[in-house]
Image: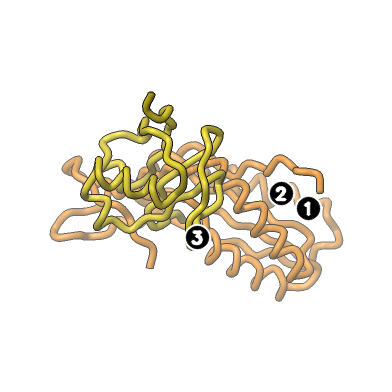
């Protein structure tokens, strides 16, 4: 059995790379392996500026993920 | 600590001048207030390589933005002697000339209102997960960058 899928929210200019604002990808153990998995699927992400948020908090370092994690990819903010 | 549901700041489309006027009017009964400070962000028709921005379409990670906004409010209220603060940001399309951000602070004397308003605007632009897509007249677009 492969990993269960988890959905990832994608915002702003990153949707130009993914083509969608919601990705379904196999759950990874932690945020670093999730980033690696996403970059494998969307090589342009390697060059994109973004942060990952888990449970609405920006990830600094590496954090573990579970099926209940809320994951989002956030490019530089440009509100106002 | 009890988890409060963060108050909403998002308004669909442009923020109307009547909405702004009503907000000001609502403070006439607050006789402890001696000064208000208001910032209005307006969509600018930037020129980019001969093309003109006709509108900005805003999207946000709403839940995260509202939680963050609540944390910023708590900081600001801890730092300045404010009577109240109101913040509204547009989502969706706002045509050039439309108001997309409304920050309104009040205090007994002017300085806290002015300084808190300015700090709120800076923090909103830097810290809220909101994105602006600048739409050109020919239907092409570019993603806004905050300077």
Comparing B61 with B52, the one in front is B61
Image coordinates for residue A65, horizontal then vertical, percent: 51, 42
- Whole-number angstrom distance, CA of label 1 to CA of label 3: 45 Å
Is label 2 on the same chain as label 1? yes
Mark carried by residue A21: none
Q: Residue furthest front?
A: A1
Q: Mark 2 lies on which chain?
A: B
Q: Mark 1 lies on which chain?
A: B
Give the residue at mark 2.
B25
Q: Mark 3 lies on which chain?
A: A
Does residue B47 sit above or below A44 in this rendering? below
Q: Are marks 2 and 3 in contact (CB under 8 Å)?
A: no
- Whole-number angstrom distance, CA of label 2 to CA of label 1: 6 Å
Question: Helix or strand or loop: what does disc 2 sit on?
Answer: helix
- Whole-number angstrom distance, CA of label 2 to CA of label 3: 44 Å
Q: Are marks 2 and 1 in contact (CB under 8 Å)?
A: yes
Give the residue at mark 3.
A60
Q: Which chain is orange?
A: B
Is B97 positioned to the left or the right of B83 in the image?
A: left
- Point 47% across, 41% down: residue: A71
Give the residue at mark 1.
B28
């Amino acid at each position: 059995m492969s990993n269960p899928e988890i959905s990832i929210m994608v915002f702003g200019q990153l949707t130009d790379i993914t083509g969608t604002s919601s990705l379904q990808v196999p759950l990874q153990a932690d945020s670093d392996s999730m980033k690696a998995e996403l970059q494998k699927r969307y090589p342009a992400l390697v060059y994109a500026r973004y942060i990952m948020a888990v449970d609405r908090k920006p990830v600094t370092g590496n954090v573990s993920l579970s099926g209940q994690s809320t994951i989002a990819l956030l490019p530089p903010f440009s509100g106002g | 600590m009890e988890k409060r549901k963060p108050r909403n700041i998002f308004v669909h489309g442009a923020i109307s001048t009547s909405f702004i006027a009503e907000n000001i009017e609502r403070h006439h009964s607050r006789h402890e207030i001696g000064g208000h400070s208001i910032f209005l962000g307006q969509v600018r028709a930037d020129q980019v390589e001969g093309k003109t921005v006709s509108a900005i379409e805003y999207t946000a990670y709403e839940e995260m933005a509202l939680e963050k906004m609540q944390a910023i409010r708590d900081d600001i209220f801890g730092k300045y002697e404010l009577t109240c603060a109101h913040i509204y940001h547009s989502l969706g399309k706002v045509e050039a000339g439309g108001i997309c951000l409304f920050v309104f602070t009040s205090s007994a004397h002017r300085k806290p209102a002015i300084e808190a308003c300015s700090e709120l605007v800076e923090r909103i632009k830097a810290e809220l997960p909101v994105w602006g897509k600048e739409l050109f007249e020919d239907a092409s677009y570019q993603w806004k960058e905050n300077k």
